[in-house]
Image: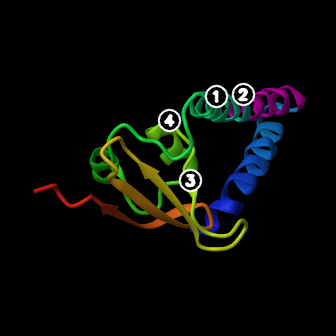
Amino acid sequence: MQFQKYLIPIASVAGVAAAYRAYGWAGVAIAVGALVMWLLLHFTRMMTVLQRAAKRPIGFVDSAVMLNAKLRPGVTLLHIVAMTRALGELQSAKDVQPEIYRWTDGTQSHVTCELVGGKLKSWTLERPAPAP
C-alpha cells in the first residue's frame, strides 16, 4: 500500500505533461485546474466530517455492533470518523504506532480499533455481560 503515496503525485505530473504535449499551455491550465478542484473536493469532505464529529462527544457511537459490522481492514481513520460521526477516544500514547482508538455506545458496548499508519489493522467488539 506504500505505492499510493507516490502514485497520485506521479500521475498528476504525467497528466500535466500529457496535457502540455497535447494542448500546450491551455492544456496545462485545464489539468492544473482539475487537480485543484480534486484537492478542494477532498478538503471539503474532510472538513465536513470533522465538523460533524466536533458536535458529538469523543468516543461515542450510536451502535457499537453496527460499527463492528461495517468495519473492514485498510479503511482510514477519517473513514471511521465519518461512519461514527465522532472522534475516537485515544487509548494508546500520543504519536505512538499502533494507534488504538475506542468508540462506546449507550449500552457500554465498545469497539477498539488498532490503526497502523492511519489505516485500520484490526478491531474488537466487547459487550458487557447481561445482567441476570
Q: The residue under label 2 is which amino acid type?
A: Met
Above or below residue 51? Residue 128 is below
Quadrant where the N terminus is found in the figure: bottom right
Q: Which numbered disc, 3 or 2, marks the residue closer to the eye?
A: 3
CA separation, marks 3 and 1? 17 Å
Local secondary structure at mark 2: helix
Question: Which comes before the other along the chain, label 4 or label 1?
Answer: 1
Residues shaded magenta: 25-38
Q: Earlier in the sequence, mark 2 or mark 1?
A: 2
Q: Is residue 77 left or right of residue 16?
A: left
- Pointer 2: what residue? 37
Frontmost residue, 132 versus 110: 132
* Amino acid type shown at disc 3: Glu
The residue at the far left in this view is: 132
Identify residue for label 3: 89
Residue that protrudes farthest toward the right in the picture: 25
Which amino acid is tagged 1?
Gln
Which of the two labelled residues, at mark 3 and mark 2, occupies the earlier sequence position? 2
Q: Residues within 10 Å of mark 2 (few under 14, many from 20)?
A: few
Mark pair 3, 2: CA separation: 33 Å
Position of residue 39 in the picture relative to residue 79 (left or right)? right
For residue 51, which numbered disc appears in the image? 1
Q: Which residue is denoted by mark 4 in the rendering?
A: 85
